[in-house]
Amino acid sequence: MSSGSKSRKQSGKQDEAAARARRKQIIVALVIGAVVGVVISALTEFWLWLPAGLAMGLATGAIMKPPSD
């Protein structure tokens, strides 16, 4: 087996792990954004803070670098 083949297999595993970490990060950020939106909506009694919280969470999850393993 050549060393190029080994590095491609390792690269594939790393890409899969990175994609999984990215998905988890975006989901966690959306949940946090939803919680923030609900809390602010409850405090201000203005329901449009919920979509704003979700947008904040999605943006945060998309911008942040996923943790490295």
Image: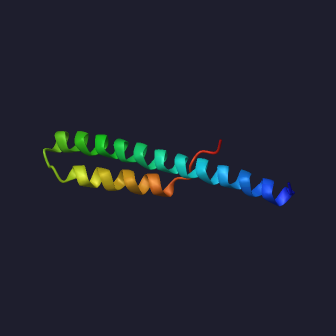
Along the line of sight, which residue is nearer the eye, 47 or 22? Answer: 22
- What is the residue that sits farthest to the left in this orientation? 45
**Which residue, as the protein is rendered here, is positioned at the far bottom?**
4
Residue 9, horizontal then vertical, whole percent: 72, 53
Q: Which colour style is shown?
A: rainbow
Q: Is residue 67 left or right of residue 28?
A: right
The image position of residue 20, as x and y in percent, is: 53, 47
Outermost residue to the right: 2
The residue at 36%/42% (across/down) is: 32
Q: Residue furthest front?
A: 1
Nearest to the observer: residue 38 or residue 16: 16
Residue at 64 percent of width and 45 percent of height = 68
Quarter of the image with the N terminus is: bottom right
Left or right: where 32 falls relative to 21 = left
Q: Residue at x 24, y 39 (%)?
A: 39
Q: What is the quadrant of residue 58 in the picture?
A: bottom left
Q: Residue at x 29, y 44 (%)?
A: 34
Q: Quadrant of the C terminus?
A: top right
How many marks on residues?
Answer: 0
In the rendered image, residue 7, in percent from the top left (x then y), is placed at 78, 55
x and y percentages locating residue 27 in the rendered image: 41, 46
